[in-house]
Amino acid sequence: MSKQKRYWLMKSEPVSYSIEHLKRDVVTPWSGIRNYQSRNFMRDEMRKGDGVLFYHSSCREVGVAGTAEVASTPYPDATQFDRKSDYYDPKATKEHPRWMLVDVRFVKQFKQVIPLTALRRENSLRNLMILRPGNRLSITPVTREEFRTILSLAS
């Protein structure tokens, strides 16, 4: 029995990795996540084929820039073992990795970023985790209805 498709919002700073980078690369490992709750979403809940809202953060035009999909099952994030990486974790071992990731595949870049202000104006998005005060998670679950509403804002 297969699990029902889920939906996610994944944040990235466009100076580090933007929707344009994903469009060029087609598939990328979503590496460098060092928050346990976000890691747990990837490790325990994400499945191949899940929908992703690609969100640009910490930039001039904050908002949803396009869509992607989860393209792999979870596996260890190699950056945790690389001493030269900003994401190196001395407590992680190959036998007992601490950090997991999934691959993400490009689906669509929106003609325009759907700004945070537009998301806030939409009453049906009032429970969207990204809109909650103090939310700092780089990966958050999104309902199918929220996903569809955001797609409708892009058209």
Image (cartoon, rainbow, N blue to C red):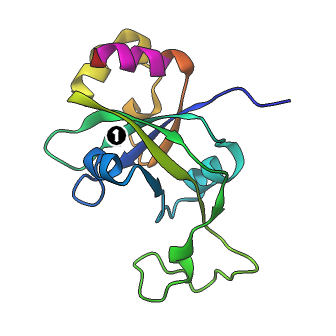
* The residue stretch that appears in magenta: 146-153
- Where is the C terminus found, in terms of image quarters? top left
Q: Is residue 152 magenta?
A: yes
Above or below, 150 relative to 99? above
Left or right of 25: which side holds 102? right
Residue that mark 1 sits on? 55
Above or below, 107 relative to 12? above
Image location (x, y in percent) of residue 79: 50, 75
Magenta segment, principal secondary structure? helix
Camera-nearest residue between 128 and 63:
63
For mark 1, does the 10 Å Cα neighbourhood hold few (<14), some (14 to 19), or many (20 or more) residues? many
Residue visible at 49% across and 61% down? 33
Quarter residue 96 falls in: bottom right
Image location (x, y in percent) of residue 93: 68, 83
Left or right of 63: which side holds 49? right
- Say if residue 113 shows up in the picture: no
Residue visible at 45% across and 16% down? 148
Camera-nearest residue between 47 and 144:
47
Residue visible at 42% across and 81% down? 85
Image location (x, y in percent) of residue 39: 59, 56
Quarter residue 36 falls in: bottom right
Considering the numbered disc 1 on the image, is that residue within a helix, a strand or a loop? strand
Image location (x, y in percent) of residue 153: 30, 15
